[in-house]
Image (cartoon, grey):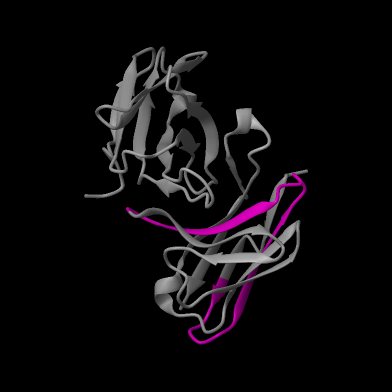
């Protein structure tokens, strides 16, 4: 089984709809992240969480909200979706206890979201 | 100037060739550096971390040049399966927050 899973994998929705993307991990990592990827722009950080009680905005948090329901679960919500939120969304986890103390990120398979 | 810059490519090389990518970063205090590989429409996967002394993993060699603020990735004896986009990732933090800056990627196509 994959260590980081995302649901749904693909979603088409209409402008104004509320959408939730879910992420679960079995790696036991404390840190979780949400990114979006657009062609030519690379990955951009939306929100990140270092533990259940810690939520931080990334560089492009406007129009998004998150919930860290448990150490293993981190959800991203679009309260009122708009077409320019069409993108590939990735969840990631990290834990600096491994990899020689270097904090290394591991990504889920992604959610392809289209807002019409 | 972008925080992390990469040549987008594509780099088209024949099988067996050696190819090198560079990535420049703007924050001289950056602490951690990585190369990730991303196949089309798939998630990025860690290829290797980049250490100050340079490091090698099979056909892949990563180097860090702090003075000139760039990291490099060298791929020897290219395989068709190496075709992918290679992302340079920099962690600019010295302590506390852990935020990663991603380059836009360099696309490699290995040709038969």
Residue A73 located within the stretch drawn in magenta: no
Residue A35 located within the stretch drawn in magenta: yes
The image quarter in which residue A38 lies = bottom left
Image position of A9 (left or right of A37): right
Q: Most extreme residue toward the front, as rendered?
A: B95
Q: Most extreme residue toward the bottom, as rendered?
A: A16
Residue B112 in sight from this viewpoint: no
The image quarter in which residue A76 lies = bottom right
The residue that appears at 62% across and 28% down in the rendered structure is A100
In the rendered image, residue B28, in percent from the top left (x then y), is placed at 31, 38
Q: Nearer the viewer, residue B53 or A25?
A: B53
Q: Nearer the viewer, residue A64 or A18?
A: A64
The residue that appears at 31% across and 48% down in the rendered structure is B3
Count of picture labels? 0
Image position of B51 (left or right of A77): left
Residue A29 in sight from this viewpoint: yes
In the image, is residue A83 above or below residue B10? below
In the image, is residue A69 above or below residue B49? below
In the rendered image, residue B86, in percent from the top left (x then y), is placed at 41, 35
In the image, is residue B59 above or below residue B24? above
Specify start and end residues of the magenta stretch as a single range.
A12-40
Q: Nearer the viewer, residue A27 or B54?
A: B54
In the rendered image, residue B18, in percent from the top left (x then y), is placed at 34, 15
Image quarter where the N terminus of chain A lies is top right
In the rendered image, residue B78, in percent from the top left (x then y), is placed at 41, 17
In the image, is residue A7 above or below residue B5? below
Q: Most extreme residue toward the left, as rendered?
A: B1
The residue that appears at 51% across and 87% down in the rendered structure is A16
């Amino acid at each position: 089984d994959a260590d980081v899973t995302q649901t749904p994998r693909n979603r088409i929705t209409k402008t104004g709809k509320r959408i939730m993307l879910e992420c679960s991990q079995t790696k036991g990592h404390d840190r979780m992240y949400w990114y979006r990827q657009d062609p030519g722009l690379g990955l951009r950080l939306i929100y990140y969480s270092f533990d259940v009680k810690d939520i931080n905005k990334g560089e492009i948090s406007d129009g998004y909200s998150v919930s860290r329901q448990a150490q293993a679960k981190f959800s991203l919500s679009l309260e009122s979706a708009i077409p320019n939120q069409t993108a590939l969304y990735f969840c990631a986890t990290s834990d600096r206890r491994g990899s020689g103390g270097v904090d290394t990120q591991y990504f889920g398979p992604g959610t392809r979201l289209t807002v019409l | 100037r972008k925080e992390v810059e990469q040549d987008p490519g594509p780099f088209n090389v024949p099988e067996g060739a050696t190819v090198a990518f560079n990535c420049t970063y703007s924050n001289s205090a950056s602490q951690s550096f990585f190369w990730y590989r991303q196949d089309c429409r798939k998630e990025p996967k860690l290829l290797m971390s980049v250490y100050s002394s340079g490091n090698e993993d099979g056909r892949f060699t990563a180097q860090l040049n702090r003075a000139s603020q760039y990291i490099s990735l060298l791929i020897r004896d290219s395989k068709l399966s190496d075709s992918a986009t290679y992302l340079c990732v920099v962690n600019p933090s010295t302590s506390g927050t852990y935020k990663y800056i991603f380059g836009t990627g360099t696309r490699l196509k290995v040709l038969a």
